[in-house]
């Protein structure tokens, strides 16, 4: 009987856990890297991307084509620098950007001097 009650409780809790995780992604900026290097999203589905800078100085996530193609409200468009398509963060800062991506493959990089040549590049894959 305990097993049946435990299984029932888990089946109720599992969908709630999945719903909490749906529509969220995280990009961590560090010294000359993005984690994940390839961000996987679903086209036409709203997502909140949590950008965080764990590096020792300022970094940005520049993906002009991606941000231009995505649908978002004016407040989120401001967070990505409008047409610049860049999330800029100082050391220890973070920001959430909510958008609806368009299907495609988009390059991303840090636009700070030499950061992309030192490996701070990535890809956004939207299926």
Image (cartoon, rainbow, N blue to C red):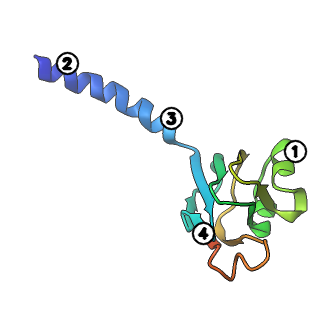
Q: Residue at x 77, y 57 (%)?
A: 87
Q: Look at the numbered discs 4 and 3 and tell me whether their residues touch, using CB distance below 8 Å.
A: no
| Residue 24 x, y percent position in the rendering | 58, 45
Q: Which residue is mark 4?
A: 33
Tell me which label, 4 or 3, sits earlier in the chain: 3
| Residue 114 x, y percent position in the rendering | 74, 80
Q: Which residue is mark 3?
A: 20
Above or below — where is 118 with respect to 5?
below
Q: Residues within 10 Å of mark 3 (few under 14, many from 20)?
A: few
Tell me which label, 4 or 1, sits earlier in the chain: 4
Q: Quadrant of the N terminus?
A: top left
| Residue 118 x, y percent position in the rendering | 65, 80
Which structural element holds mark 3?
helix
Q: Residue at x 58, y 51 (%)?
A: 26
Q: Which residue is mark 2?
A: 5
Q: Which residue is mark 1?
A: 74
Q: Is residue 1 left or right of residue 107?
A: left
Above or below — where is 34 with respect to 91?
below
Q: Residues within 10 Å of mark 2 (few under 14, many from 20)?
A: few
């Amino acid at each position: 009987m305990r097993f049946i009650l435990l299984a029932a409780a888990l089946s109720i809790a599992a969908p709630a856990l999945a719903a909490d995780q749906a529509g969220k992604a995280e990009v961590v900026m560090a010294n000359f890297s993005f984690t994940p290097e390839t961000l996987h999203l679903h086209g036409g589905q709203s997502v909140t991307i949590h950008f965080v800078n764990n590096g020792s100085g300022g970094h940005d996530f520049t993906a002009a084509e991606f941000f231009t193609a995505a649908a978002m409200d004016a407040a989120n468009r401001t967070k990505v620098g409008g047409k610049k398509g860049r999330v800029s963060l100082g050391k220890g800062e973070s920001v959430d950007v909510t958008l609806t991506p368009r299907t495609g493959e988009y390059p991303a990089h840090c636009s700070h001097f030499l950061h992309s040549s030192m490996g701070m590049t990535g890809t956004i894959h939207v299926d």
